[in-house]
């Protein structure tokens, strides 16, 4: 693994910064009404931000075909570096047709606000079914990642980007810690080894258990919940962040944990997304990364531990970050503590673990999840929120608990 005096090297060796300087921004703003525009959806907006702040280093823009093809086929960029998820900007044919390679394209967010610039180097068609099968392991449109893929345009437009400016996050400004800042914080605290944790769900006892197991080994824990686009029935980001605040206040050593938001969107790509999440956390300065049960999975598209096995397809030095692989954690009624099958002598009947769907069902009925699943303060917060937000419960499938 490559280390430097200021910590682990970013993927590719250099932390990318594509945030326009005030001078560059002024030049782009003066051209705003004279260059063609493309409107980004929530996911591509977050991709733009992640490229600009260095979260997707070594990418400097949306992928050209030379990178796109080997990433889809074999999880590598054109230069051979591991990369498992295509980062593309896809548009309709009528949008792509007038765009000229070698020119600038204005990038607007969903509200029509001018937020970025694309230096267009290439536009090319791509095979959606091939990308679906290779990246998501399915062609089924009911898979949320495949659904997004099928709904986007058939032409990729590619090239380096510039983000016009880095604004405070509208919901979580105190937790907006970009890669350069997280690296500085780790150095300031004297942390040499840092484990990153990815989640799109509220924290529960199984999460707490594996985080604290990891924290016994490394200097610091970087809690990095994803706050970009997720599925309709996922718990909203503000609720998840509040649950983390509660946990850190009562149950974690404050000097050994940093909570920060990950602005990226979920792909639900299972094993490939586990590699992707690990590389992103390397860019934030993490030396280790927790990979648990069905990481980034959805439905029954992936095997329980496929997201762990995929790390064996790469040399450890290539990824530059150490995966910490944990089995499914549960509350063991025999030993009366959290455990996994590696540490518990219990039978399946003596193990308490609830699925996310079942817990959401309980919350929507006003039932408090048992303390074996969630800390009481967190459980109460979840019940209160779900009762207040009826629309969250309307998306939860009917399942008998």
Image (cartoon, rainbow, N blue to C red):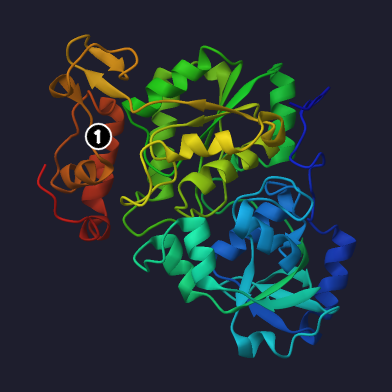
Left or right, residue 59 beside residue 334: right
Where is residue 337, by image quadrant?
A: top left
| Residue 335 higher or lower than 365, as above or below | above
- Is residue 98 shown to the viewer in this render? yes
| Residue 384 higher or lower than 287, as above or below | below
| Residue 338 higher or lower than 240, as above or below | above
Where is residue 352, by image quadrant?
A: top left
Residue drawn at point x = 33 percent, y = 30 percent: 204
Percent from the top left, x then y, of residue 272?
Answer: 53, 48
Percent from the top left, x then y, of residue 221?
Answer: 55, 24
Question: Of all residues shown, which one is farthest toward the left?
Answer: 400
Left or right, residue 346 beside residue 140: left
- Is residue 167 shown to the viewer in this render? no
Q: Residues within 10 Å of mark 1 (few under 14, many from 20)?
A: some
Percent from the top left, x then y, of residue 371?
Answer: 22, 24
Residue drawn at point x = 79 percent, y = 48 percent: 16
- How many numbered badges does the structure rendering display? 1
Which residue is denoted by mark 1 in the rendering?
380
Q: Nearer the viewer, residue 313 or 36?
A: 313
Q: Quadrant of the N terminus?
A: top right
Q: Nearer the viewer, residue 332 or 50?
A: 332
Residue drawn at point x = 52 percent, y = 58 percent: 134
Q: Quadrant of the C terminus?
A: top left
Where is residue 255, by image quadrant?
A: top right
Residue drawn at point x = 68 percent, y = 45 percent: 82
| Residue 185 higher or lower than 111, as above or below | above
Of helix, strand and loop, which one carries label 1?
Answer: helix
Question: Of all residues shown, which one is farthest toward the top?
Answer: 335
Percent from the top left, x then y, of residue 285?
Answer: 69, 32
């Amino acid at each position: 693994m490559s280390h430097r005096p200021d910590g682990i090297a970013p993927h590719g060796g250099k932390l990318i910064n594509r945030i326009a300087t005030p001078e560059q921004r002024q030049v782009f703003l003066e051209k705003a009404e004279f260059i063609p525009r493309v409107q980004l959806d929530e996911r591509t907006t977050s991709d733009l931000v992640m490229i600009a702040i260095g979260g997707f280093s070594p990418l400097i823009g949306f992928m050209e075909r030379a990178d796109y093809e080997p990433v889809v086929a074999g999880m590598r960029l054109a230069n051979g570096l591991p990369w498992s998820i295509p980062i593309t900007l896809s548009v309709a044919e009528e949008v792509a047709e007038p765009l000229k390679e070698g020119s600038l394209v204005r990038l607007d967010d969903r509200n029509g606000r001018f937020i970025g610039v694309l230096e267009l180097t290439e536009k090319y068609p791509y095979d959606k079914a091939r990308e679906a099968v290779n990246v998501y392991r399915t062609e089924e449109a009911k898979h949320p990642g495949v659904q997004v893929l099928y709904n986007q345009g058939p032409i990729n437009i590619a090239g380096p980007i510039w983000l016009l400016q880095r604004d405070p996050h509208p919901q979580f400004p105190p937790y907006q810690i970009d890669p350069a800042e997280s690296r500085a914080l780790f150095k300031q605290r004297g942390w040499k080894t840092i484990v990153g944790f990815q989640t799109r769900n509220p924290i529960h006892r199984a999460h707490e258990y594996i985080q604290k197991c990891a924290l016994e080994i490394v200097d610091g824990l970087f809690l990095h919940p994803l706050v970009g686009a997720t599925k309709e029935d996922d718990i909203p980001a503000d609720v998840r962040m509040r649950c983390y605040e509660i946990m850190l206040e009562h149950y974690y050593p404050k000097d050994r944990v940093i909570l920060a938001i990950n602005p990226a969107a979920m792909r639900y790509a299972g094993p490939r997304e586990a590699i992707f999440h690990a590389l992103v956390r390397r860019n934030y300065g993490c030396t280790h990364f927790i990979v648990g049960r069905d990481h980034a999975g959805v439905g029954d598209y992936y095997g329980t531990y496929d997201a762990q096995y995929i790390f064996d397809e790469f040399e450890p030095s290539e990824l530059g970050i150490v995966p910490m692989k944990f089995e499914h954690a549960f509350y063991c009624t025999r030993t009366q503590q959290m455990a996994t099958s590696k540490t518990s002598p219990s039978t399946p009947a003596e193990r308490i673990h609830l699925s996310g769907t079942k817990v959401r069902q309980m919350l929507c009925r006003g039932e408090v999840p048992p303390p074996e699943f969630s800390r009481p303060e967190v459980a109460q917060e979840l019940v209160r929120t779900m009762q207040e937000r009826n629309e969250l419960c309307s998306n939860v499938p009917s399942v008998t608990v």
